[in-house]
Each structure stands twice: as C-alpha cells, then as structure tokens.
Image: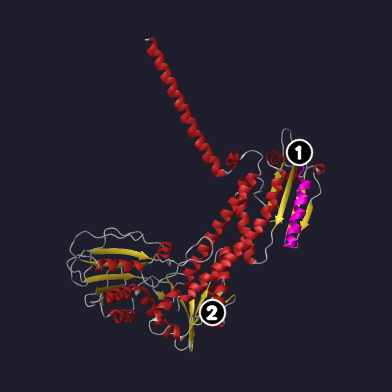
Amino acid sequence: ALQSHQSDSHPCPLIVGVVLPRAKTTPEPLRFPTIITRAIIKGRRPWIPGGETMAFFNGGSRALVEILTRFQSAERPMPVDHTFFEFGSVRYHVQASASDPENVYLSISTPSLSHEASPSTGLPEFTLQEATKMYHKFAEVVEPSKEGYALTLKLNFSGLARPKDRARAVRQVSLLQSVILGSQLKHLLGSLGSSGATKLVYNHRDPFFVSRTPGKISAIFPMRFRDDTDLAVATSFFQELQDAGSSYARAPRCSWSAIPPPELRGEPVHHLTTNGGFVSFDIFERHVKRKRAAKTAWILLNFQAYVKYHIKCTRNYIQSRMRKRQETLAEVILNARLRGGDEKKKLQGNFTRKLLLSTQTEFRKAVDTITSLILICYEKEIAGCD
Amino acid sequence: ANTLRLYLTCIRNTLEAAMCLQNFPCQEVERHNKPEVELKTSSELLLNPVLICRNEAEKCLVETSINSIRISLKVKQADELENILAKKFLRFLSMRAEAFQVLRRKPVQGYDISFLITNYHCEDMHKHKLIDFIVQFMEDIDKEISELKLSVNTRGRLVATEFLKQFI
C-alpha cells in the first residue's frame, strides 16, 4: 500500500541548505487503519474463532526501513525521492541522487507534544541535540531543515562496513519520530520539577495529564466516548487491563477509576468531565532506563488510538457474528415452508433478486433461441417456395 | 438449565394451543383483512393474553386473536454490556425482519422483540416448525448474547495482555 513516486532524472544539487525540488506527485496520505493493518503481527492469532489478528503500534516506521534497505541493497546507484505519510499526520521525505549515492536526506514533519493543541512548528533545540546524540555515528542534522519539515537528517552509512551494523542503523533511523516525542516528553516532565501535574496534547487528540511525584510519573488519560457500545466495550477493556497488569510486574501499573484520581485535584472541571473514566499508568525508573524512555513514551502517546482501534475491531467482530446468526435463523424459518426447497430461496431478499435476474436472463435466451429457430424455418420455407 | 427447559416447554405448549388461526376479514372496513391482535378493535375477536415469566427479567407475552397471534419476548440482561449487546443484536434482527417474515420491525413496548404470526403464515408454513422456530430463536438469542459477551471480554483480555507486553 505504500505509494511513492520517483522524481524525474534531474541531478540533485549537493549543497546543504538549498530547497530541493519536491516530488511531482504527493501520494495519498496513508490512513490510520492502513498503517495498523501493515503493522499486524504475523503468525500470532488469538483463539477466538474467526482468527482475527491483532495489531500493535510499532515505534519504528516499517516503510522507512523498507525504503532505506532497498536503497542500500540496490546494485547500482539510483535516484530516490519518496514522500509518504504515517498515522495521517507524520510526513517523511527521503531523497538521494544517483551522483551522490552515499548521502540520503531524510526529512520529517511530525505533530508536536505540548501543553495546548497548537500547529506544529520547528523542533526545539533540545530535540535537535537528542537527535544528534542518537544518530551521530552515521547522520548529521541539516540546518535549516527542508521547507515544510521540522527536521532534516543527512544519512551516510558508508562508515558502517558490516551489513548487520547498517541494518541496525536503519532500524534506529526508523525510530526517529519516537525519539523526537520522547525528548519532548522528557523536557516537559523536567519542567514539572520534583512534583506537579500538567496537561499535554498530542496531535490535536484528547488531552491527557502527566503527574510527577518523587519516584514515579503517572500518565492519566481521561477517556470519552460518543457511543454507548464504545463505552461498554472500553470499560470491559479497562477492567481487563487493570487485571492483566498484576500479571506483568515489569509493565507499568495500570488502574482505572470512574472518578478523577487525586493527582488531578485542582484541574478545571471541563477537563475532568468524562464518561469512560480515567486510566492511569504509573511509570517508574525501570520503565525509562536507558533507551526505554522513547519506547515507553511512544506506547503511552498512542494509548488512546490503541483503545479506539480495539473498539473498532470489536464492533466489526460483533457485526459479523450477528450477521452469521441472522443467516442461521433465517434458514430455520425458510425450512418451515410447506413447499419444496427450491422455492424457499425466493423468499430471502438477496436470493430473490438473484433468482429474478437469472430467470430473466434465461427467459431472454429462450426467446432468442425460439426467434432464431422461427427465422430459420421461415427462410427455409421461402427458399423452398423459390 | 432446568428452569430454561421448563420455560420453553411452557411457551411451546401455549403456542400450540393459541396458534389456531383462521382467515377473518375486517369487520369494520370492507374488503380489508387486518391482524386483529394489532388493532384490538373488537373484543370478541381477542383471547386473553398469556404472560409466562421465567423470572423478573425474562418473560414472554402471547396475545392471540382470531386471525393472528403476537408473541413478545423480554430477554435476560444481567449487566450493562449484556444490555448493550442484546439491544444491538435484537435491533439488527428487527431491521432485517423481512428475512424472518414473522418478525415485527418494532417490538411491543416493554419488550425486546416481537413476532406477529397471521393465518397466512400458518397456511404457508408447518405449524409445528413455526413453533420450533420461535423456541429455537429464544434459545439462540440467549446463547448468542452470552457468547458475544464472553468474546468481548476475552478479546479485551488478549488485547490488554498484548499492550502490556510491549513494555517488556
């Protein structure tokens, strides 16, 4: 489903900082369900009949891994100019020229994590420093970044001789978005001091709260749903999440409550009005040690989207089960008819239409056959008379 | 299970007794033939309704007239999730009432789903199979709602487990 377009064979300038020509056609942004579908875990199937697979949110961009791997493994240098979207709002641009195959320019535009819902602007200095620190072995930050993008990296894997190192580097690059978000979250948490609570908004979604106390950080998500069915499914999920949390000691402790937790005392009422309650995750030092911070931040920032996806899949499953049961029950009433089995099909809506159509087609064929036979007989008669 | 068997047997026996329908043109409008159980204009054409209760939450109302019979069911709903699932499922079936012929598009007030059987249905279908359908419908509804609830909870548990595994 990845749509990308190569630019024409115009040689790209090698000077850093010049606005490079954009791709001629920008592909349709990959929609959220498409990305989730492509992130399906292969080979893991729940026991539920129907065998639906479940998705999880991978922090790395699989599309980016595919493009960079393909570029590196190409037999001869080829120009690359890909623009693609992920999650509907994250935009990547990958560009390389045939005359300079060692340097690949990767640009990213991502919504920011901030206190209020605001349009995304350039990345702050600490994020650029974090990216430089993370990728200093094979990349450097290009300033100013490409127009329309928050960050541009110049990637050069020639210093990595072993294919395994290159593959690892490509995987690290694919985590760029989670690195950016992780650094933003770290900075926002740092501004809280040793204790306090603040509201955060990511990508114009529903705001959530982060509360810091000595020894732990709590991420609190007020959950709101429009539909009663969504609410019922989500409530069941939150209770299971709370119960499952006790089995996994290494995962953050999860709790759900219908009323606002004590950490949110003092927050405005309109932020605390929900119908789905509040889901809290307690993050301790072991969850953010070393490189886990970016991954933990990524997982938590996508929690609300994860819940919505689970609800959507559950509704689809319920719908398909209801449809199957309806067909089973409809067969029972059809079998109750006094006449034979062939006519039973006439009564079902879809079958009636198909039967009528096939009957009409057969009737027309029969009429055509008879007409042609009559014509043949007539011609024979005329020929006989002559 | 015992109470369910008794409940269904009682309903079956009631329907076998009540389903003695004949064609009866409308007494008030010429050349019209209407199910009298719906109109309830002439009391002499109506029989006493029978209410069969399994418990406070589950009951079945059988209203009979000379040319039609109306069966209304109230399905068990133990909690909020079952309530939502039952409402959703029965509404799904009611919207496709033409596939069932004897199903009413809108349930009688106070009940979750209703059937309307007329003398024409009795002429087109076997009476005992019609009653079997009603009874099987009731069993399948209960079974389906229980299975849906179980599936929703199980899915939730699996998804929650997978979510937490990401942190490990």
Residue closest to the eye, A280 or B166: B166
Position of A253 relative to A231 (above/below): below
Whether B4 is among the magenta residues is yes
Q: Is residue A272 visible?
A: no
The residue to which callout 2 is attached is: A247
Q: Which of the chains bears the disc numbered 1?
A: B
What residue appears at the point 31 percent right and 76 percent down from the top-left corner? A168
Residue closest to the eye, A141 or A82: A82
Where is the N terminus of chain B found, in terms of image quarters? bottom right
Where is the C terminus of chain B found, in terms of image quarters? bottom left
Colour pattern of the rendering: secondary structure
Q: Residues within 10 Å of mark 2 (few under 14, many from 20)?
A: few
Residue closest to the eye, A268 or A183: A183
Residue that sits furthest to the right in the current view: B44
Q: What is the number of the mark on residue B22? A: 1
Disc 2, SS: loop
Q: What is the number of the mark on residue A64? A: none
What residue appears at the point 47 percent right and 30 percent down from the top-left corner? A364
In percent of width and height, residue A381 lies at 41, 14
- The residue range painted magenta reads B1-21
In percent of width and height, residue A43 lies at 44, 66
Disc 1, SS: loop
Tell me the distance, in whole angstroms, between the alpha carbons under discs 1 and 2: 65 Å
Instruction: Tell me if A37 is positioned left or right of B32 in this view.
Output: left
